[in-house]
């Protein structure tokens, strides 16, 4: 059975060491990550994994929110482009059967507005 992982990171860079430890300890087939706080061109590499990112909005040079999935390269998968204003990314993954995985981050409303727009 494939191991799956999900985590609201509250910042990928701030928790990168812990994520590396979890990946090396549990060797998940895939991980759904929320609140990554990284931009669209951020160079994220995990050995033997593919990384698919949907950045959140940039406000004053800082990225907020965002969602990502990482999937083992040895597992057949296809990134699914989504046409939505939501902070979401998806992939079709085949382990013992084919599933579609979606990582979605819904930010809380802020005073004076909402990061979703």
Image: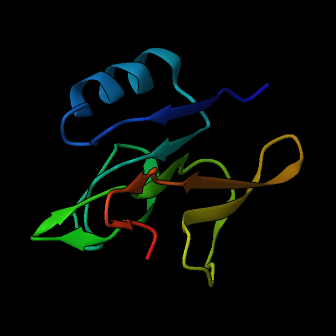
The answer to whether residue 90 is above or below residue 2 is: below
Seen in the image, is 38 located left or right of residue 2?
left
Q: Looking at the image, which residue sits at the far bottom?
A: 83
The answer to whether residue 55 is above or below residue 21 is: below
In x, y percent, where is residue 69? 52, 52
In x, y percent, where is residue 104? 58, 55
- Asked which colour scheme the image uses, the reply is rainbow
For the image, the number of numbered tags is 0
Q: Looking at the image, which residue sits at the far right?
A: 97
The answer to whether residue 46 is above or below residue 38 is: above
Within the image, what quadrant is residue 15 found in?
A: top left
- Of residues 112 and 66, the one drawn nearer to the viewer in this rendering: 112
Q: Residue at x 19, y 35 (%)?
A: 14
Seen in the image, is 50 located left or right of residue 46?
right
Q: Quadrant of the N terminus?
A: top right
Q: Residue at x 59, y 52 (%)?
A: 103
- Of residues 103 and 62, the one drawn nearer to the viewer in this rendering: 62
The answer to whether residue 112 is above or below residue 29 is: below
Q: Residue at x 52, y 25 (%)?
A: 27
Within the image, what quadrant is residue 117 found in?
A: bottom left
Q: Looking at the image, which residue sits at the far front?
A: 112
Q: Looking at the image, which residue sits at the far top?
A: 25
In x, y percent, where is residue 84? 61, 80
């Amino acid at each position: 059975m494939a191991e799956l992982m999900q985590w609201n990171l509250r910042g990928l860079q701030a928790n990168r060491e812990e994520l590396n430890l979890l990946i090396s300890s549990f060797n998940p087939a895939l991980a759904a990550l929320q609140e990554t706080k990284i931009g669209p061109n951020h160079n994220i590499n995990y050995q033997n994994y593919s990384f698919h990112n949907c950045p959140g909005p940039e406000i004053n040079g800082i990225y907020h929110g965002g969602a990502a999935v990482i999937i083992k390269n040895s597992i057949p998968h296809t990134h699914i482009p989504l046409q939505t204003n939501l902070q979401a990314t998806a992939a079709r993954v085949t382990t013992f059967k084919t599933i579609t995985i979606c990582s979605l981050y819904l930010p809380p409303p802020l005073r004076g507005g909402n990061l979703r727009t």
